[in-house]
Amino acid sequence: MTTIAVFVDVQNMYYTCRDQFGCSLNYRNFYAFLQQRGDVVHAFAYAIERADDKQRKFQDALRHIGFTVKLKPFIQRSDGTSKGDWDVGITIDMLEYAGTVDEVILLSGDGDFAMLLSHIKQKFPTRCTVVGVDQLTAFALRQSADEFLPVGSQWLQGS
């Protein structure tokens, strides 16, 4: 059976699904799909920690489904902008686990990960799959993957 490690850029998936479909990703349905695809040996969801009950419930639901939730503090800058991306953390973890599984699956549309996937494919005999919102996934990221799976209705809330 194919071994899989999954890495979810929660913020990216939230905003791209909301902007394109007006709803959220259904992580339970997506995880069920992953289990049909192979043996999910690692599943990480990278999120921003906010003092908010709704976010805590969402993160608890992710844990219940089978994800290890990694949290980074929300940073509000003095100029009113905010920061809270996980690009470096996701990169480190993907490099750490890529050599231990048959396939890495990245849920993100962020083109900054294209170089990472290209590097993984050169260094490891690991298949790289990207899952993202079709119209909002960077072309470079799609090109760097072995396979691109567009988010469809089967993985959206209310489906």
Image: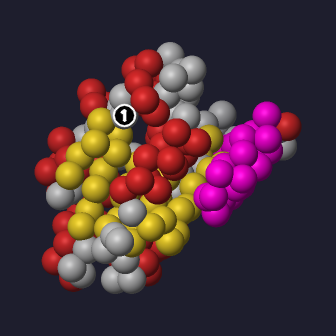
Please give left or right for residue 74 compared with residue 83 in the image: right
Q: Based on the picture, tell me whether residue 109 belongs to the magenta stretch.
A: no
Does the rendering let one see residue 50?
no
Does the rendering let one see residue 125?
yes
Please give left or right for residue 80 compared with residue 107 in the image: right
Q: Could you tell me which residue is drawn at 19 percent across and 67 percent down?
A: 118
Q: Quadrant of the N terminus?
A: bottom left
Please give left or right for residue 146 compared with residue 95 in the image: left
Residue 158: give x, y in percent of width and height.
57, 20
Characterize the local packing of mark 1: few (<14), some (14-19) or many (20 or more) Cα atoms within 10 angstroms: many
Q: Is residue 82 above or below residue 35?
A: above
Q: Could you tell me which residue is drawn at 43 percent across and 29 percent down?
A: 154
Q: Which residue is mark 1?
A: 151
- Name which residue type carries label 1: Val
Tally the marks. Answer: 1
SS at circle 1: loop
Q: Which residues are magenta?
A: 54-77
Q: Could you tell me which residue is drawn at 50 percent across and 16 percent down?
A: 22
